[in-house]
Image (cartoon, rainbow, N blue to C red):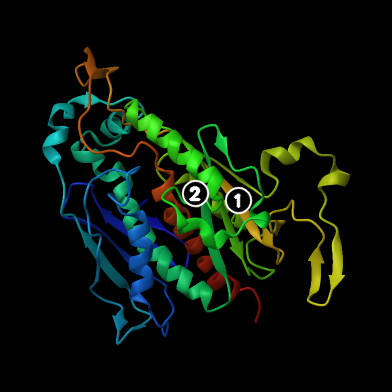
């Protein structure tokens, strides 16, 4: 319910306007030299108030570890951590205490639990993803020790789409601009689109592309825990995500089998495929090629403009929410997508140790 993973497991806790967000990571191998600066770097990429196109809530998002790390190394024991909330404006939500905001989890949480924390969405807030970013940053370091890297980037905002394949662009330029699109020309158009949405007190969605390089052949399970299925499960668990595809995805349905098949070829590095429509995964198991996927995000539900809705007494009313909100979640969601992908891959790396004697 609140735990993700089979061997490398994260249990997260906390609410948007509670004392803080935190988690317990179990199953992390001992002996990993933990680079706290890299963890903090990913938290800085996710935190609010980082640019003119994100919410202006100000949070340092400094992680504090309580256990599982000694003298800079993981101990193989549970890693407990927390990030304290400092800049909550809970009063901004007082008028919404008894109101169901359109497309939010207010109604569904009330029906499920009979109660809800109305301050900033409580547990349903995307602020919960801080815990995932911490765990994902540790998973990234496990993977990096095996030569595996993960990079996500914004490939679409509204109707503005990066037309180039990830193989045609320099992914190291992703963080060179505030929208986190590695193509500077497209990035400027995306920023303009987000600013237009904000000016109209509206929101806009888009797509994040993720790429994992260096994943060896043989990771993934053949039936219920196929690698792409676990990646899809991870991505669809991120707030505001509406869709997931990997490899050729939905576009691949337009091709014939002879066009779509990835032909195996002999190379100096061993067996490879001539193309990669499979997205690095065949039969649910990695084949040694790049694992790449796309994650669709809806326009976030909080609009700073009037909307019709109902309250808990079923009265029809009009709301005009206050507060500090992102006009587009995409730039801050890039490290979240990377984190979830890293946790899936780290889990499958550890699971792969069980496959043979």
Crowd rating for badge 1 (residues with CA inside 10 Å; few <14, some 14–19, many 20+)? many
Q: Is residue 277 left or right of residue 6?
A: right
What's the residue at 47%, 63% (across, down)?
343
Q: Residue furthest top?
A: 316
Q: Tag 2, which secondary structure?
A: helix
> Visible in this render: residue 248?
yes
State the image quarter where residue 103 is shown. top left
In the image, residue 318 sits, relative to residue 204, either above or below, namely above
From the top left corner, tell me how far across and down residue 347 is, in percent: 51, 66
Q: Is residue 226 visible?
A: no
Badge 1 marks a residue whose secondary structure is strand
Pick whichever of labels 1 and 2 is earlier in the sequence: 2
Q: Point out residue 13 in the picture as x, y percentages from the top left corner.
A: 27, 55
Which residue is nearer to you in this view: 328 or 255?
328
Q: How many numbered discs, if any?
A: 2
Image position of 162 with respect to 266: above or below: above
Residue 229, above or below 326: below
89 or 356: nearer the viewer: 89
The residue shown at (23%, 43%) is 122
- In the rendered image, which residue does mark 1 sit on? 293
Q: Position of residue 302 (x, y in %)?
A: 31, 31
Q: CA distance from mark 1 to mark 2?
A: 10 Å
Looking at the image, is mark 1 or mark 2 nearer the viewer? 1
Tell which of 141 and 281 is nearer to you. Answer: 141
The label shown at residue 235 is 2
Q: Indicate left or right for 64 with 34 as reference.
A: left
Whether tag 1 and tag 2 are in contact, CB under 8 A, the answer is yes
Label number found at residue 192: none
Relative side of 292 to 330, left or right: right
The C terminus appears in which quarter of the rendering? bottom right
34 sits to left or right of 310: right
Q: Can you tell which quarter of the image residue 44 is in?
A: bottom left
């Amino acid at each position: 319910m609140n735990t993700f993973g089979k061997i490398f497991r994260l249990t997260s806790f906390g609410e948007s306007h509670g004392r803080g967000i935190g988690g317990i990571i179990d199953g992390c191998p001992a002996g990993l030299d933990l680079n706290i600066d890299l963890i903090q770097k990913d938290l800085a990429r996710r935190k609010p108030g980082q640019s003119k196109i994100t919410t202006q809530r100000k949070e340092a998002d400094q992680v504090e570890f309580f256990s599982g790390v000694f003298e800079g190394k993981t101990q193989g024991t549970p890693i407990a951590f927390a990030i304290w909330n400092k800049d909550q404006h809970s009063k901004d939500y007082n008028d919404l205490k008894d109101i169901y905001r359109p497309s939010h989890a207010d109604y569904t949480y009330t029906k499920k639990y009979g109660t809800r924390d109305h301050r900033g969405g409580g547990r349903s807030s995307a602020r919960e993803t801080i815990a995932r970013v911490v765990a994902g940053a540790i998973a990234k370091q496990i993977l990096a020790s095996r030569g595996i890297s993960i990079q996500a980037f914004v490939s679409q905002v509204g109707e503005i789409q990066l037309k180039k394949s990830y193989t045609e662009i320099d992914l190291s330029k992703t963080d060179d601009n505030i929208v986190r699109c590695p193509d500077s020309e497209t990035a400027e158009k995306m920023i303009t689109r987000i600013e237009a949405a904000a000016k109209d007190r509206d929101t806009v969605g888009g797509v994040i592309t993720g790429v994992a390089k260096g994943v060896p052949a043989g990771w993934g399970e053949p039936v219920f825990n196929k690698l792409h299925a676990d990646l899809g499960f991870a991505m669809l668990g991120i707030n505001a995500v509406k869709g997931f595809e990997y490899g050729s995805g939905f576009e691949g349905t337009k091709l014939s089998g002879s066009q779509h098949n990835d032909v195996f070829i002999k190379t100096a590095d061993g067996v490879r495929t001539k193309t990669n429509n499979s997205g690095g995964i065949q039969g649910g198991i990695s084949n040694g090629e790049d694992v790449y996927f796309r994650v669709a995000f809806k326009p976030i539900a909080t609009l700073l403009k009037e909307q019709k809705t109902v309250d808990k007494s079923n009265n029809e009313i009009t709301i005009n929410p206050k507060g500090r909100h992102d006009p587009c979640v995409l730039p801050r969601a890039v490290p979240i997508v990377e984190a979830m992908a890293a946790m899936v891959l780290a889990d499958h790396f550890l699971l792969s140790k069980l496959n043979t004697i």
